[in-house]
């Protein structure tokens, strides 16, 4: 579990560094729809919550698994509510009308002018040529690249075992330690009581240490599920 939690923390920090605006937008959007005020701090400090899990003992995890996965398993199915959609739309329309009355015609005009000015400053101002020249890459002789070999096979067009799958296969052979693999997995033969553990199983199988050439290595592989 320590490997799983550490990997989740790394992914959250990476998303905050590379796609911060979308991460914050998703958090605030979910909070606006489903959250309560006391949950906002937890939603914005998810990594802190994960760090607290690192000190949990095996008995704690066993107790949680028995409580939520073994002893009592509940499947919650949500259905869109037309009444809730109408309520939210009505509330938002009322809020906008109240805001318009509060600002008045002059207030709306000033807001429009501020918005137009901000858009103009954002789009009209261009970086000076001196700054662009400093960011230009002038020498590419020693530019390091990966050697990529692409293998593509459609169903039944190749005798290799890997291409006997009943779906198109596309493989990029890259000489690097970073690997991304996307699988489509048929789980109909897995008993229902064991499917509860699939997410945890796949997290562990690709993050647990492995012995390769008498050396312990840690594999980090991301998996996306299509149920």
Image (spheres, helix red, strand yellow):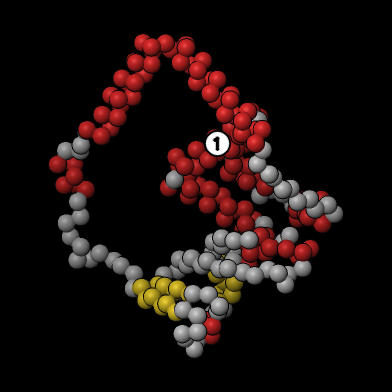
Mark 1: few/some/many CA within 10 Å (<14, 14-19, 20+):
few
**Which image quadrant: the N terminus?**
bottom right
Q: Residue at x 72, y 72 (%)?
A: 189
Image quadrant of residue 52?
top right
Closer to us: 23 or 221: 23
In the drawing, does residue 117 fall left or right of residue 101?
Answer: left
Closer to us: 90 or 127: 90
Q: How far from the left and from the top, in percent, is residue 180? A: 48, 65
Q: Residue at x 65, y 30 (%)?
A: 36
Q: Residue at x 58, y 25 (%)?
A: 90
Closer to us: 10 or 33: 33
Closer to us: 137 or 73: 73
Q: Residue at x 45, y 68 (%)?
A: 177
Q: Is residue 39 visible?
A: no
Q: How far from the left and from the top, in percent, is residue 99? A: 48, 16
Residue sitting at the far bottom: 159
* SS at badge 1: helix
**Which image quadrant: the C terminus?**
bottom right
Q: How far from the left and from the top, in percent, is residue 14? A: 48, 50
Q: Which residue is mark 1?
A: 29
Q: How far from the left and from the top, in percent, is residue 64? A: 78, 51
Q: Is 187 located above or below residue 86 in the figure?
A: below
Residue sitting at the far left: 129
Q: Is residue 72 visible?
A: yes
């Amino acid at each position: 579990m320590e490997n799983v939690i550490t990997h989740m923390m790394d992914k959250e920090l990476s998303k905050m560094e590379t796609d911060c605006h979308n991460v914050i937008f998703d958090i605030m959007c979910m909070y606006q729809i489903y959250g309560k005020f006391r949950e906002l701090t937890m939603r914005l400090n998810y990594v802190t919550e994960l760090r607290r899990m690192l000190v949990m003992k095996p008995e704690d995890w066993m107790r949680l698994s028995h409580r939520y996965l073994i002893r009592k398993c509940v499947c919650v199915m949500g259905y869109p509510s037309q009444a809730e959609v109408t309520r939210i739309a009505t509330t938002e329309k009322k809020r906008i009308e109240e805001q318009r009355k509060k600002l008045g015609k002059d207030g709306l005009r000033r807001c429009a002018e501020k918005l137009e000015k901000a858009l103009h400053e954002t789009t009209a101002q261009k970086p000076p040529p001196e700054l662009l020249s400093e960011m230009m890459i002038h020498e590419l002789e020693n530019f390091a690249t990966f050697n990529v070999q692409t293998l593509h096979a459609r169903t039944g067009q190749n005798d290799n075992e890997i291409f006997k799958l009943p779906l198109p296969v596309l493989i990029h052979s890259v000489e690097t330690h970073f690997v991304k693999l996307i699988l489509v997995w048929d789980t109909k033969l897995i008993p229902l009581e064991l499917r509860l553990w699939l997410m945890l199983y796949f997290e562990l199988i690709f993050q647990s240490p492995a012995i390769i050439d008498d050396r312990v290595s840690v594999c980090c592989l991301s998996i996306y599920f299509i149920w």
